[in-house]
Amino acid sequence: MADNKPAPIVIKKIKKVTGGGHGAAWKIAYADFVTAMMAFFLLMWLLGSTTKAQLQGIAQYFQNPEKVSLSGGSGAGDATSVIHGGGTDLTRTVGQVRNGATPGTKVAPNATTVMRAAEALDRRNLEALKKALEQQIQANPQLNAFRSQLLIDITRNGLRIQVVDSDKRPMFALGGAQLESYAQTIFSDIAPTLNQLPNKITITGHTDALNYQNGGKGYSNYNLSSDRANAVRQTLVQSGLDEAKVLRVVGMGSAAPYDAKNPSSALNRRVAIVVLTNEAAARILADQGAEQTASTAQQAQAKLQAASAAKPAPVASAAPIAIKP
């Protein structure tokens, strides 16, 4: 007897691939390639921007990865000291470098830093000279006897040494510019000490307010103070002071009294020696117009020569020119 069961129906589904045999696998490979190239260029950039000390720190990390966990710090090349607050470790040869520092190079200081350093050095030298003078006065019996007449202090312009008069023991004879023997000893003894620094020196003479009877029309307090300052200069130079260091010798008369409330006081009769700072000496030269360029000096000399050549030669028998009052 024949089997009346229907035959099973088989449905075949064929999956068609339209992109070829490789499909979209090339996109994944390309993405991996681009990622690898980006990582390569990033590595090249890091190697180019990393200092030698940092590279050494990275190498040490791979040699000893437990260094940071054991000793602490922000990295394997950490250059900070275990005890903070100190200066730069002079023994450091590897490790991180602070910002702005390049191994093997020195940062040149700017003009302001150099100027401040020079001023500080100048101030220290003047303070050392002040201390040396005070010790000399203390150790020398002749100077120690006049200690009350020696006033030493540091001003804005430099180290000032003032030798003031005394009613019982004046430096000069009344109205004269001749140093007394004991006053000459003071300046002779301090001259070698002043010569220890290369700084320029100014010498200023002062008088009291007692004026001459001529009303300033003849020899006056200005002449007297100038003569006394120059007498001190001469004594200093004869006792060992380099004359080239003397920048200015001035007579102030009674214009700047030490004791303003008592114009006739003996304290106003004094001689002030100032060991100038380099900045003060440069300022004085600039104020006096001594800093002139060579071209300006040559032009002035050329004008003088031209004016001299234009004038006729003087006649020996020519009469003097009468000047009317």
Image: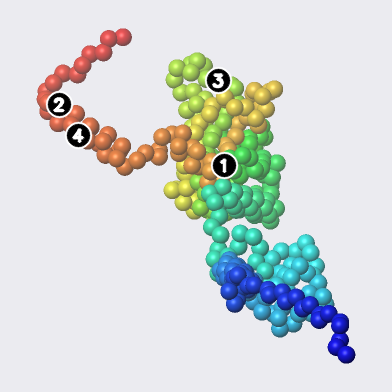
Q: Residue 20 at x, y = what percent? A: 58, 74
Q: Are marks 1 and 2 in contact (CB under 8 Å)?
A: no
The earlier-in-sequence mark between 3 and 1 is 3
Q: Which residue position is annotated with label 3? A: 211
Q: Secondary structure at mark 3?
A: loop
Label 2 crowd (10 A; few <14 / some 14-19 / many >=20) = few
Of badges 1 and 2, nearer the viewer stands 2
Which numbered tag is attached to residue 311? 2
From this view, report whether residue 24 is shown above or below residue 324: below
**Farthest residue, direction bottom:** 1
**Farthest residue, direction top:** 325
Q: Given the image, on which type of amino acid does mark 3 rest?
A: Asn
Mark 3 and mark 1: span between their CA atoms? 26 Å
Q: Which residue position is annotated with label 4? A: 305
Which numbered tag is attached to residue 274? 1
Q: In this rendering, does residue 217 appear at all?
A: yes
Of badges 4 and 1, nearer the viewer stands 4
Q: What residue do we see at 54% from left, 66% from top?
A: 105
Q: Are marks 2 and 4 in contact (CB under 8 Å)?
A: no
Mark 2 and mark 4: span between their CA atoms? 10 Å
Q: Given the image, on which type of amino acid does mark 1 rest?
A: Val
Q: Residue 95 at x, y = what percent? A: 67, 72
Q: Are marks 2 and 3 in contact (CB under 8 Å)?
A: no
Mark 2 and mark 3: span between their CA atoms? 45 Å
Q: Given the image, on which type of amino acid does mark 2 rest?
A: Lys
Q: What residue do we see at 61% from left, 44% from top?
A: 159
